[in-house]
Amino acid sequence: MSTTSAERLSKDAIKARIKEVMRKRQSRRRCKLSDEELVLLALAHSSDEWLMTAQIGEFAISNSRFLQKEAANFLFGRTSLYATPQGIGSLPSRIENYLRTYGIPVHSSLDDQNNKVYSMTAGAAYALLEGSYKKPSQATEKKLSTCPLLKIPIEIRMKIYHLVLKVSGFRLLVGNQSLSVYDDKIPAWESHSQDALRMPPLNDFLALLSVNKQVYNEAMPEFYHKNHFQFRDMGSMKNFLNNIGPERRKHMRNVSVSYDNLSAAAAGARLLAESDTLQKLTLTMSATQDPAGHFTVNSSRRRFSSLTQIPGFSSMKRLRGVQQLIFNPRLEHAVVDAFLRPIITTPKPSKLAKTRKSTERKRKRKHSELMSNHEAGQPVVKVSKID
């Protein structure tokens, strides 16, 4: 009797198959499943549902009798997995890279609390189980690399990525599963006066990135390069930048943020400073200095003896090459403007200049070592200039 497609894709059938695989892939002494396979099995077991990292870890521990908490903690990147049941930031980048190259589509998004969540469709779960955990063969990889989209010249592909991934004329208010967009002609600090437009869920909007690894590497920078990202406060910016990881946040060019939630400002600014391409920064904040010389930010009661003590400002000072620094003109911001603008708008040093500085440091260090040897009575060799 033939099995229908609906029966093959039923959750009960998938869970039964997973149970069978788990039983067969565990010997008396160890689990023969890799960490990555356990992640994929957890997603397949809860197909069509969103899972946080902690839930994936709980599946791995409860279903693999040889996977101890210490091993799970190493995999999921926290000292204590169960100490933070509300969720653990994001999967390590090595797991995400594995998911992209495995040949099984896994979707990621942010839930309402800005936690990274992952899901796999029932169809993908069935394909995973039928594949018996074999990585894509050379034939499969060749097929993926020669998909119709990749037959188009790269110049045209980049135009396609631009049309698909850039939300022209709008800025993205991020932090939820669904994107909210606002008219970019209206300043970020006037967002409350606009009616937000709803966009598809982030995983649907970025579905193009799931085609294969090559398309991901080509299209991902385009999404972060071309769009204007707005954050309600430093906490939401910190969560978003932490979730997308260093590889993606370094491509961001246009960011607007309200400098509220100072408890998260230091971490948020540190992550933002990792962007190599930030060109436009809009800060909605007020900063004043009292007669005693102390500074206050927005409505915070905290007073700071210097601007560098304001959470996040020491990290902000590491930014270079920002072409536009914008403040809400209705708020007092002169002291912050005078402090940040001369520093962060300084052009980035060229790679040649960095190389020359590095070479000069090496030459001086070598000279210092030779002089020390001379003082110690050892023969001195003449130091020639390093080209």
Image (cartoon, helix red, strand yellow):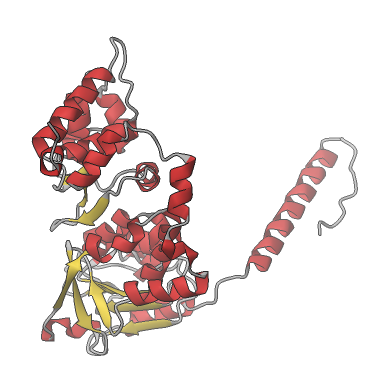
Q: Nearer the viewer, residue 379 or 223?
A: 223
Left or right of 377 on screen, residue 297? left
Q: Nearer the viewer, residue 314 or 259?
A: 259
* Residue 17 sits in quarter: top left
* Residue 175 sits in quarter: bottom left
Q: Nearer the viewer, residue 123 or 75?
A: 123
Q: Residue furthest front?
A: 1
Q: Is residue 54 above or below residue 32?
A: below
* Residue 239 sits in quarter: bottom left
Residue 341 visible in image: yes
Which residue is at 18% across, 32% downward? 59
Position of the N terminus, as image quadrant, is: top left
Left or right of 48 on screen, residue 134? right
Left or right of 259 on screen, residue 151? right
From the top left corner, tell me how far across and down residue 26 is, in percent: 27, 17
From the top left corner, tell me how far across and down residue 73 is, in percent: 28, 31
From the top left corner, tell me how far across and down residue 65 is, in percent: 22, 18
Position of the C terminus, as image quadrant, is: bottom right
Which residue is at 40% across, 74% downward? 160
